[in-house]
Structure formats: structure tokens, C-alpha cells
Image (cartoon, helix red, strand yellow):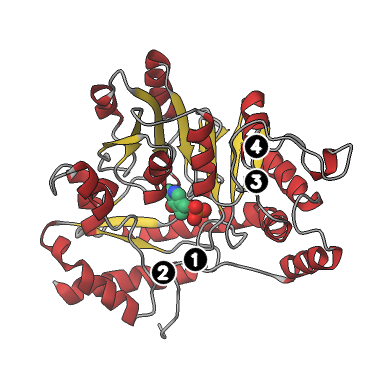
Amino acid sequence: MSQRQLPFGKPLIYGEERAAIEEVLASGIMVHGPKVKQFEKDFEDFTKAPHALAVASCTAGLHLSYFYNDIKPGDEVICPAQTHTATAHAIEYCGGKPVFIDAEEKTGNIDISQIEAAITENTRAITLVHYLGLPVDMDAINKIAKKHDLFVVEDCALSIGAYYKGQHTGLLGDVGAFSFYPVKHMTTAEGGMLITKHEDMAKKIGVQRAFGVDKVVGERKEAGIYDVTMLGFNYRMNEIESAMGVEQLKRMPGFLEQRKKNFDTLYQELQELSEVQLLESSNNDCQSSYYCLSFLLKDRFSLKRPEVQANLKAQGVGTSVYYPKAVPLLTYYREKYGFGENEFPIASKISDTSIALPVGPHLDEDDMRYVANAVKESIRSVA
Ligand SMILES: *Cc1c(COP(=O)(O)O)cnc(C)c1O
């Protein structure tokens, strides 16, 4: 096969997105307009969520979730070690302490069997990430949360289009936060969305995302007059981002279908490869959103990741690592809490020996066969 260039991720932006952005620019309405309302309504329809709130980023959404729950100094939040740093940072913004739990090796999701032993009288919440789009066993999480009266935050940055027992991720816990960062499933450049079943929470977070102001521009009886009833942030999504979101969301069914086809093709091709261990994906209860296909290099190959990645790059195949270090071992957390290098062995094993391959809708099944051949060739080259 001749050389291809297959980036790990690539936003797919078309004429409809450009036209929608132009429409916003021409209207002169940049915030508090019709596009954000439309995007929220469409997101509710897509996920079947009772309430959706557009926010500035997934990180802002996570921060709002803990802030709403009044996480404060002295409070502890159960948090996966194998995730994006944002999952833990948002706890720290509130002065709370993330209590890290190692990953389970077959999926990379939080090891639920280790949670109960980490709960103390200061534990207030559990957060989790649906790692690479594969839903966590939410029945098991909710059972623990109910027993200890804990608030549940789902980091859904990689799980738009993922379902647990038929329900969209983000609706299983108390609140779910999505990301529209460029390499995620869909993009608004920067942006995020919160979904929840709780009406009172949606109302309050709606106020907290906009300074704690009691009346937004359109609701004011007298121009310019408002009160501030609580502390809040400027975490709104603007009209340009929202307009992009409306158009991108229409593409999601097609995007997800292509991701699944790509993933299945690549999985088939790599399944028999004895040098790698593929992370498990969908099963009966858990329908993945197929963010990427990640595998661990086994045995002596585990030390050859830089060479394998370089060889793939030379063949035009973009790769990534999710995530490059267990969060508690990132310098900020290691220095603050004094974790040792070997405390999160599974999360570290995934960080140190895994390679994530692209399956996004910018690629097709023939590209997947190219990627599979490139992987086999790369492994041969270091054998
Ligand atoms: C990308 C990502 C985030 C951050 O999303 P932003 O929208 O950039 O704030 C948070 N959590 C996870 C798991 C992510 O992958």
C-alpha cells in the first residue's frame, strides 16, 4: 500500500458550520442568544436528558458540578487515577482532595472493587471517567454512592454516544460533563455541556455559570437592573461556539457509525496479534462511543513504545497516549500529596505501555487495514 497520512484526530468542519457562524456574526448577538438555547435543546434530544446546560469547557462543567455540590476544604472526592488531569483539577479548584483509585487492566476504567476501602467520613462525592468511551458499571457505582450518600459526577468528555443499559452516559449519576475540544467526538473549538436529571440542579448551575446573576439579559424588566444571589463564574458558551455545536451534533449519528465500523475493522485485524493486549470495548450493558482503539504492548515489547510510535509515525499513522501519566503521579499531585511511583500500578502500566490508534470519522475502513498493517510492521521492526 502506498503511504498515507492518517492523523490521530481531525475536526471535520463543513460549509454548514461556516454558514452558521457567519449568521451569528451578521446578527451581532454573541452571547445570551438563540443558538445556545437551540444547542441545549438539541443535546437534550440527542441524549434524552431532561436538562442540558452549555458551558465554556468540560473542565468548567466539572468545576460547576463540584461547586454546586459545595465541595470545600476538608472534603474528599473519589477520583480515577487514569484520566485527564481536569477530572482531578476541578476538585482542587474547590479546595477538595481527590482520593485516587487505580484502574482495572482490562478496560482502563476505575477499579470499583477498590472504592469502598477509600471512603472516609470526609468523602462527599465520587467522580469517574468513561475511559475512551466505554461506560463504567454505573449500577455498581450507584450502589456504593447510595450506601454512603455520595454525589456522583460523570466525566463524559470521551463518551458522547455511549450508553449504559440503554441510558446515555451522564444520566446515570447526578451530573455528566461533556467536552467539545477539537479532538473529541465533535467540536465547538472549546466548549462543554452538562446534563442532569435534577431540575433544581439545572436551575442553580444555570445561574452559577453566569456570575450568580438572578436575571439574564432577556429576563430583565428594567434595562440593566439585576441582583446577584450567589457566587458564580463566567462559564457560559458563546453563540459562535453554540452555532457550531448545533451543526456538529447533527453529524453525530454518522460520526458514531463510522467510528464503530472503523473500530470493529481495526479490532478484527489486531485481535490475533500476540504481542499486544487490546483493551476491552463494548459488552451487553456497556455501549462504547469508540473514542480510539488502545492496546498495551506486552512483555519485552512494553519497553519499545517510543520505537513503535516512531515507526508508525514514519508510516503516516498518528497515535496518542491516554493518558501519559497517572494523574496522582503528575508533578503537581505527586508533590502535593507525596505519592510514590508504584502506588497506581495499573494506571501506570496503561500510561507507560499503551498506544492509542485513531478510529475517527476522518478515516474509513480501508484506512483501518492500513493502520493494522502499519502496527504489525512496527512490531516486527522492534522484534
Ligand atoms: C479532554 C478531557 C477533558 C477536558 O475537556 P475540556 O473541554 O478541554 O475542558 C476532561 N476530561 C477528560 C476525560 C478529557 O478527555
Residue 81: quadrant of the picture? top left
The answer to whether the residues at label 1 and label 2 have Cβ atoms under 8 Å apart is yes
Secondary structure beneath label 3: strand
Secondary structure beneath label 1: helix
Residue 148 point in image, percent of width and height: 37, 16
Q: What is the CA distance from the residue labelled 4 to the residue labelled 1?
A: 49 Å
Q: Which residue is mark 3?
A: 54
Q: What is the CA distance from the residue labelled 1 to the residue labelled 3?
A: 33 Å
Residue 74: quadrant of the picture? top left
Q: Which residue is mark 2?
A: 369
Q: Which residue is mark 1?
A: 365
* Residue at (77, 47) in percent of width and height: 38
Closer to viewer: mark 2 or mark 3: 3
* Residue at (41, 69) in percent of width and height: 369
Q: What is the CA distance from the residue labelled 1 to the residue labelled 2?
A: 7 Å
Closer to viewer: mark 1 or mark 3: 3
Residue 162 point in image, percent of width and height: 52, 42
Q: Residues within 10 Å of mark 2 (few under 14, many from 20)?
A: some
The answer to whether the residues at label 4 and label 3 have Cβ atoms under 8 Å apart is no
> Which of the marked residues, 4 or 3, is nearer the chain's N terminus?
3
